[in-house]
Amino acid sequence: MSNPSQTTATAPTAPQEHEPRIVAFQCKWCTSAGSDLAGVSRIQYPANAVPIQVMCSGMVSPMYVLSAFNKGADGVLVSGCHPGDCHYMKGNFFARRKLYLVQKLLQFIGLESDRFRMSWISAAEGTKYAQVISDFVRDMKALGPQRKLKAKR
Amino acid sequence: MVKVEDIQQCAAGLLEKGQVKSVLGFRRGTAGAMAEPCTITEAAEAGTLVWDPTCLNNLALYLVKDRKQQAASKTPDIRPIGIVAKGCDSRAVAVLLQENYFKREEVFVIGVSCEGTGVIDPKKVATLLKGRSPSRVEFDGADGFKLTLRGGEMQVPAREILADRCLECRAASPALNDVVFGEPSGERGYATPFHAAKEALGASETERWAAWEHHFDRCLRCFACRSVCPMCYCPECVVDSTSFVIEPQTSAEEKANRIKWCERSPNTSESAVYHLTRAIHLAGRCVDCGECERVCPVNIPLRLLNTMLEMEAFEMFHYQAGHDLSQASLLSSFRDEDPNSFIR
């Protein structure tokens, strides 16, 4: 008896829809807690985002973003606490200024501006987290794979 | 009009009195009309200093080099250095002071105002003269240059051969100085500030990527832009790890686990990471001296990346590099009214 999963895998299928890979840098105090809340509340959202917990959105170096794109990410999300709510008082303000420039730079060289996003998600906003990720995945599916900055290896 | 004798006398005076250990300036080069950077340590050598539109280099770079040399020396010579500085050079010194790279009393800025014009772009001169090279380039009035050729002299309007950055320059006279020669002058009205960056932004996304892909693809990764930049003074650059070198005994596992931001190979993607990183590291620090673009062997318009960020810093955050010594740097400060609308 053949294994049904094997037969479906080998059978000629329609061209597969691109499954985007999204790298999400999430601050430990707000967004990570928010994504936890989305999880424990059993809110359904796509599993395309790879969460990377950072201590603060202010520690996200522009190199993290560039490197993620270089290693093949279709989209990069940086998410932190709402302005004024930073655990370290002003980390997210620094992040906002720094990543604004990164976003402008990526736009300037002609990368689709939608591929880099920032969001403020507090620990109580599990639904917002699910919403942000679903929107991001939907838009990235429409844009297709990111080939511009991806290393050709 | 700046008289070169004034600069020479000033330099000789400083050296005679022992106020400075050396003076960084320009002397007549050996190749054609171009001046070359020089260091003079004796008052008698001051006569070799020149000032003309071919004084392209940003001499602040040599202050950084001296600083590195003194730091490595067993008997550091901490006497101040004199530097002949144009508007852009003086801004570079200001940024280095703002970053506490050296102290104010360790540098004596001999400011020279570019007045109505600025420095030439050798490529534009070569195009204009169809490959012939002038034996002498001089200032000619408020908005022109005088080129001396084998066949005679020729007057050229400044606009035609002025370097791109000089066309857009907003502060041609050195704001930071100990002594200044020449008339103060601000914006010159050849082109609006950030003209080139704005023009590049006018193209569509596809066109911009096509252009930059071509540029990044051409990059040889010779790192001339990094070497010539007075702001690129990190002892270790992200693109070449010197403290984690790969040795014969480095295991494969160790190599695999090492953080590597980008490869050294000159691929499009790796060069893109290098240039974007450099641009972002220069955000709020680049003084638009245009040296990176000048030294690029494959003519990548690197100045565009930097001026685009300068434009954003100026328009969104009202920040100008090298403008105010007491100001916190662009990325270590923030304001409540910084743009927030791009964040979800």
Image: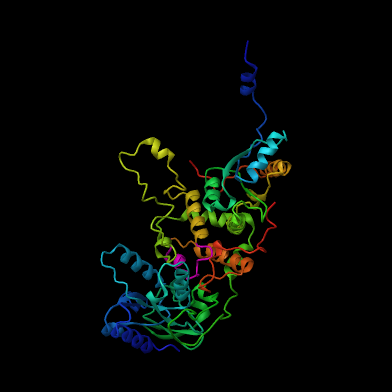
Q: Residue at x 68, y 47 (%)?
A: A122
Check the image and report above or below for A135 versus A15.
below
Q: Position of residue B253 (x, y in %)?
A: 40, 35
Can the viewer see residue A3 in this picture? Answer: yes
Task: Classify the position of the N terminus of chain B by image quarter.
Answer: bottom left
Q: Is residue B283 magenta?
A: yes
Horizontally, residue B221 falls left or right of residue B273, namely left
Check the image and report above or below for A49 versus B175.
above
Q: Residue at x 68, y 53 (%)?
A: B343
Horizontally, residue B182 falls left or right of residue A30, namely left
Pick the residue in front: B245 or A86: A86
Can the viewer see residue B133 in this picture? Answer: no
Check the image and report above or below for A122 versus A41.
below
Q: Position of residue B55 (x, y in %)?
A: 40, 77
Residue A138 falls in which quadrant of the image? top right
Residue B105 falls in which quadrant of the image? bottom left
Q: Is residue A12 magenta?
A: no
Horizontally, residue B285 falls left or right of residue B240, namely right
Check the image and report above or below for B296 versus A19.
below
Query: How many dots with numbers?
Result: 0
Q: Which colouring convention does the figure follow?
A: rainbow
Q: Position of residue A131 (x, y in %)?
A: 72, 43
Pick the residue in front: B204 or A78: A78
- Please identify the residue farthest to the top as the structure is shown: A1
Report the magenta residues as a range: B282-297
Q: Residue at x 30, y 40 (%)?
A: B248
Q: Position of residue B151 (x, y in %)?
A: 38, 84
Q: Main secondary structure of the magenta part?
A: loop
